Image (cartoon, rainbow, N blue to C red):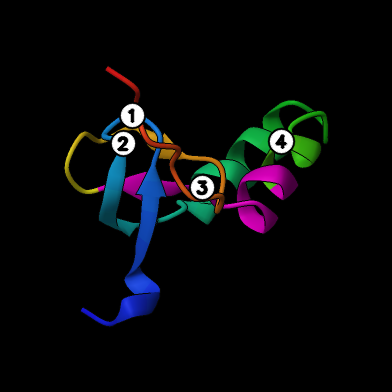
Amino acid sequence: MSKSDTACCNHCNKEVHYHYDPINHWWHLLLSICSLGLWLPIWACVTFGPSKICDECGNPIWSDQPVKAIKR
């Protein structure tokens, strides 16, 4: 993996590799049709704002900010 595939995870408190979960567009289309378009804003948020998923803990990585050192 390249350096661009790593980010700082706030849950693991270290730099980890991440991935994006795939989006099932057919399912979102079906939900949009069944809800008469009410699902469209949610579909847009999921499509244009994908979150990074930590490969170690499975939690979302919301920020690109570096992890602060924990004081013990």
Of the 4 image quadrants, the one containing the N terminus is: bottom left
Discs 4/2, front: 2
Give the extent of the magenta segment. 44-54
Question: 65 left or right of 71?
Answer: right
Provide residue 55's location: percent of width, then percent of height.
21, 48
Discs 4/1, front: 1
Q: Residues under labels 2 and 1: Cα distance? A: 5 Å
Question: 40 left or right of 28?
Answer: right
In the picture of the structure, the residue carrying the numbered disc 3 is 51
In the picture of the structure, the residue carrying the numbered disc 1 is 11
Counting residues from the N terminus, which is met first, the one under dot 4 or under dot 3? 4
Counting residues from the N terminus, which is met first, the one under dot 3 or under dot 1? 1
Q: Residues under labels 4 and 2: Cα distance? A: 30 Å
State the residue in front, 38 or 5.
5
Provide residue 33's location: percent of width, then percent of height.
72, 38
Q: Few, some or many C-alpha atoms within 10 Å of disc 4 (few <14, some 14-19, many ≥20)?
A: few
Amino acid at circle 4:
Ile
Q: Residues under labels 4 and 3: Cα distance? A: 14 Å
Counting residues from the N terminus, which is met first, the one under dot 4 or under dot 2? 2
Amino acid at circle 2:
Asn
Amino acid at circle 1:
His
- Residue drawn 29% across the image and 53% down it: 15
Of the 4 image quadrants, the one containing the C terminus is: top left
State the residue in front, 39 or 15.
15
Residue at the extreme top of the image, as rendered: 72
In the picture of the structure, the residue carrying the numbered disc 2 is 13
In the picture of the structure, the residue carrying the numbered disc 4 is 42
Q: Few, some or many C-alpha atoms within 10 Å of disc 2 (few <14, some 14-19, many ≥20)?
A: few
Q: Magenta includes 13?
A: no
